[in-house]
Image (tube, rainbow, N blue to C red):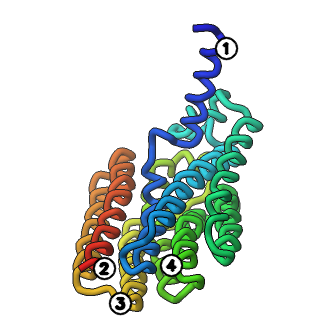
């Protein structure tokens, strides 16, 4: 194999790391609230076109978001244990290369959005703004996790709009539920970097809540369940969903309790990963309830 092929292979590997291709928990966390909204709005049976557009769009925008994040954090990442091997931090990619990857992914996602109605196309610009703003909030506020929740929950608003041609109260409650949920799981994620973040001056809810972080997680998960439950009630979901939501809430709280009990970086990462699985279980109960 020639040197050019080796170099190209190294670049592709670096791009794979840039968009977190081997690590798709983030894609799932972005996908689930979008699917909750899509299935509820469509009465439990969304069309294949909408399923494809929102699933592929979720992957593309999450990947683009990772690139934006790494471009924004390239000055911090070399000093944080978890992130020092990222492509920009380690020099395997430069800013121009990362920006080109981000632009290509965003363009592909917008091509998908153009298959939807006018309101959803307009809403996509707000989603892009939220995704672009998130990496910079940690410099000025302790609440970047809340902005992440808004960015990750915006897909739920767009999915509802794509089906209904409007944004209803149920969609806004699903969006709010995701803000609470994302703030909870990203606070758990931020616990892994807390000491490094304090040293380099990055802000987070994990730092803001301090010794009360585990109490805050409990409150956030309960608020998530209340908001999602209210949206589901407006949409007419029944006992199967609400029983499932109670099970999922118990699982979320158990994951948070495990993080508190163990108090290690590994436990925090496992708690974060658990959210990606439990979010899919919420969708399962929505689908079952709406197709009985």
Q: Secondary structure at mark 3?
A: loop
Distance (Cα) linking label 4 and label 3? 18 Å
Which label was assigned to residue 236?
A: 3
Rendered image: mark on residue 176: 4
Lower position in the chain sequence, tag 1 or tag 4: 1
* Front: mark 1 or 4: 1
Q: CA distance from mark 1 to mark 4?
A: 49 Å
Q: Name the foreground residue: 170 vs 120.
A: 120
Residue 184 seen in this snapshot? no
Question: Label 3 neighbourhood size at 10 Å, few (<14), some (14-19), many (20+)?
Answer: few
Residue 103 position within the rendered picture, expressed as x and y whole percent measured from the top left: 72, 48
Give the spatial CA distance, label 2 vs label 1.
54 Å
Label 2 sits on residue: 290
Local crowd size for mark 2, using a 10 Å CA cut-off: few (<14), some (14–19), many (≥20): some
Q: Outermost residue toward the top? A: 2
Q: Quick one: label 2 or label 4, which is nearer the N terminus?
A: 4
Pointers 4 and 3 in contact (C-beta within 8 Å): no
Mark toward the start of the polypeptide (4 vs 3)? 4
Q: Which residue is mark 1?
A: 4
């Amino acid at each position: 194999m020639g040197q050019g092929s080796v170099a190209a292979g190294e670049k592709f590997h670096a791009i794979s790391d840039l968009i977190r291709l081997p690590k798709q928990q983030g894609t799932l966390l972005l996908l689930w609230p979008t699917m909750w909204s899509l299935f509820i709005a469509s009465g439990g049976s969304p069309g294949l076109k909408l399923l494809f557009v929102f699933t592929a769009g979720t992957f593309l925008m999450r990947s683009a978001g990772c690139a934006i994040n790494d471009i924004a954090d390239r000055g911090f990442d070399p000093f944080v244990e978890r992130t020092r091997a990222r492509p920009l931090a380690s020099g395997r990619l430069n800013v121009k290369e990362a920006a080109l990857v981000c632009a290509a992914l965003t363009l592909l996602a917008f091509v998908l959005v153009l298959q939807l109605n006018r309101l959803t196309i307009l809403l996509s610009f707000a989603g892009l703004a939220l995704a672009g703003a998130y990496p910079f909030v940690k410099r000025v506020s302790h609440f970047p996790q809340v902005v992440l929740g808004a960015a990750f929950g915006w897909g739920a608003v767009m999915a509802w709009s794509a089906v209904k041609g409007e944004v209803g109260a149920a969609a806004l409650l699903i969006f709010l539920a995701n803000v609470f949920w994302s703030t909870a799981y990203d606070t758990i994620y931020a616990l892994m970097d807390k000491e490094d973040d304090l040293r380099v001056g990055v802000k987070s809810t994990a730092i803001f809540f301090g010794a009360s972080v585990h109490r805050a997680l409990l409150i956030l998960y309960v608020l998530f369940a209340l908001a999602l439950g209210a949206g589901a009630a407006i949409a007419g979901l029944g006992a199967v969903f609400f029983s499932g939501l109670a099970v999922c809430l118990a699982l979320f709280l158990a994951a948070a309790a495990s993080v508190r009990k163990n108090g290690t970086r590994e436990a925090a990462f496992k708690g974060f990963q658990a959210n990606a699985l439990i979010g899919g279980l919420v969708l399962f109960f929505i689908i079952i309830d709406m197709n009985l």
